Image (cartoon, helix red, strand yellow):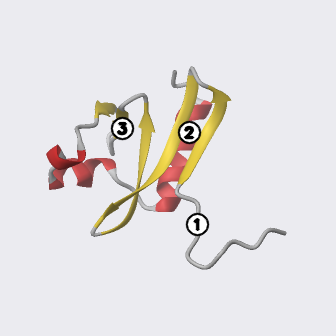
Amino acid sequence: MITLPPGCRATRYTFGGNPRHSIAVELTHHDHDTWAIRRDGDVLNRDGKWEWEPTPSERDDDFLARTRFDFTDALKLAAIEYANGTP
């Protein structure tokens, strides 16, 4: 078993080894830890649709509320998107 140094944690999970078909779940910070599901510059929203992700300074509260998830939901949704063959 590997012991990580104090304060060290995973901040990114990637589904798939094929660069043409991978979905990343990345830790993002906005007041507290939230997770985003990203693919090729797009981010998954709560309606299950992919939308373009603006630069951090252009992301408003509505965008963050639409596209950020808790860890459990983010992993579940990313796995579903990957299983469904989202390119």
* Quadrant of residue 30 within the rendered picture: bottom left
Residue 47 screen position, x and y as percent: 32, 40
Q: Which residue is mark 1?
A: 9
Disc on the earlier residue, 1 or 3: 1
Identity of the residue drawn at 50% across and 47% down: 25
Image label count: 3
What number is the disc on residue 83?
none
Secondary structure type for disc 3: strand
Residue 65 screen position, x and y as percent: 25, 55
The residue type indicated by label 1 comes to: Arg
Q: Which residue is mark 2?
A: 80
Disc on the earlier residue, 2 or 1: 1
Identity of the residue drawn at 43% across and 38% down: 38
The answer to which of 49 and 6 lies nearer the viewer is 6
The residue type indicated by label 2 comes to: Ile
Neighbor class of circle 2 (other Cα within 10 Å; few <14, some 14-19, many 20+) is: few
* Quadrant of residue 70 within the rendered picture: bottom left
Identity of the residue drawn at 26% across and 48% down: 66
Residue that lies at the very extreme toward the right in this rendered image: 1
Secondary structure type for disc 2: helix
Residue 86 screen position, x and y as percent: 51, 25
Residue 57 screen position, x and y as percent: 17, 48
Disc on the earlier residue, 3 or 2: 3
Comparing marks 3 and 2, which lies closer to the viewer? Answer: 3
Distance in Å between CA atoms under marks 1 and 3: 22 Å
Q: Which residue is mark 3?
A: 43
The residue type indicated by label 3 comes to: Val
Secondary structure type for disc 1: loop
Neighbor class of circle 1 (other Cα within 10 Å; few <14, some 14-19, many 20+) is: few
